[in-house]
Image (cartoon, grey):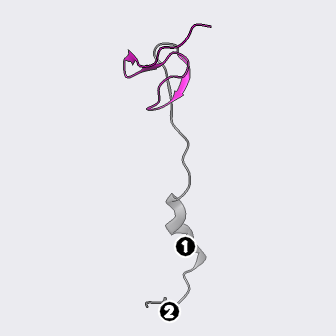
Amino acid sequence: MAVPKRKHSNARTGSRRAHDRLKKRSIAYCPQCSSAVPTHVICPKCGYYQGRTVVQQEES
């Protein structure tokens, strides 16, 4: 089995892991009710997605 001959330095390990961090979810605003919604998600307030109403919401 192949085994490394020398230990990788901390700088080399850190530069390899530079892109492994978590990224923030991008937020869009619903064109119907203007509430903040994550992208590619049906709006929980009005049920609007991709230019049409997908889920009918109950009036309260």
Q: Residue furthest left?
A: 51
Q: CA distance from mark 1 to mark 2?
A: 16 Å
Name the amino acid type tagged 2.
Answer: Lys
Dot 1 falls on a residue whose secondary structure is: helix
Tell me how many marks there are.
2
Q: Is 23 contained in the magenta span?
A: no
Dot 2 falls on a residue whose secondary structure is: loop
Q: Is residue 36 left or right of residue 56?
A: right
Quadrant assignment, res 50: top left
| Residue that carries the numbered disc 1 in the rendered image | 13
Q: Residue at x 53, y 65 (%)?
A: 17
> What secondary structure is the stretch in magenta mostly built from?
loop
Instruction: Pinpoint residue 11: horizontal percent, then vertical percent.
Output: 57, 73
Give, as a single range, the part of the protein colored magenta.
34-60
- Which circle marks residue 45 in the picture? none
- Front one among 43 and 34: 43
Q: Residue at x 49, y 88 (%)?
A: 4
Q: Earlier in the sequence, mark 1 or mark 2?
A: 2
Q: Residue furthest top?
A: 59
Q: Marks 1 and 2: CB-CB under 8 Å?
A: no
Q: Is residue 10 left or right of residue 47?
A: right
Q: Residue at x 54, y 47 (%)?
A: 23
Instruction: Pinpoint residue 51: horizontal percent, then vertical percent.
Output: 37, 18
| Residue that carries the numbered disc 2 in the rendered image | 5
Q: Is 42 contained in the magenta span?
A: yes
Q: Dot 2: few (<14), some (14–19), or many (≥20) neighbours within 10 Å?
A: few
